[in-house]
Amino acid sequence: MTSSTIVGFVALALGGVLLFVAWRASNAPVDQLSQALTGRYTDNTMWYVLGGVAGVVVGAALLYRGYVRN
């Protein structure tokens, strides 16, 4: 197993955790109120979503690159 494959697994797992945290945060009463009044979620929730999506994309790309090479 190459180092890029290990980093890919870690990035994919971290992205999944961040997306889960973002989902849980979006159901919080403060976020629900913010979304109802302004039409968008709080900044922290959006950073969790962006970080999670970036982690999943980078992790998947590294895993794909590792499997294509072998």
Image (cartoon, rainbow, N blue to C red):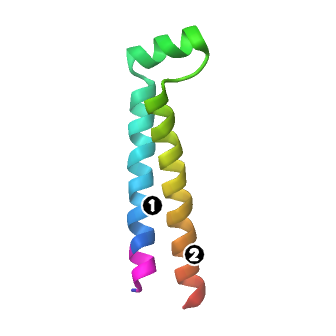
Q: Measured along the vertical axis of the image, is residue 69 above or below residue 9?
A: below
Magenta includes 5?
A: yes
Q: Residue at x 48, y 24 (%)?
A: 42
Q: Residue at x 48, y 29 (%)?
A: 43
First of labels 2, 1 by sequence position: 1
**Left or right, residue 14 beside residue 57:** left
Image position, residue 21 (x, y; %): 38, 38
Q: Are marks 2 and 1 in contact (CB under 8 Å)?
A: no
Quadrant containing the N terminus is bottom left
Query: Circle 1: is it few (<14), some (14-19), or many (20+) Cα within 10 Å?
Result: many
Hey, which residue is sitting farthest top in the picture?
Answer: 37
Disc 2/disc 1 C-alpha distance (Å): 12 Å
Q: Measured along the vertical axis of the image, is residue 54 above or below residue 42?
A: below
Q: Measured along the vertical axis of the image, is residue 11 above or below residue 68?
A: above
Front residue of 44 and 31: 44
Image mark for residue 64: 2
Q: Residue at x 54, y 66 (%)?
A: 60
Query: Circle 2: is it few (<14), some (14-19), or many (20+) Cα within 10 Å?
Result: some
Tell me the magenta residue range.
2-6
Front residue of 39 and 43: 43
Q: Residue at x 57, y 75 (%)?
A: 64
The residue pinned by badge 1 equals 12
Quadrant containing the C terminus is bottom right
Hey, which residue is sitting farthest bottom in the picture?
Answer: 70
How many numbered tags mark residues here?
2
Disc 1 element: helix
Image position, residue 57 (x, y; %): 56, 59
Image position, residue 50 (x, y; %): 53, 44
Disc 2 element: helix
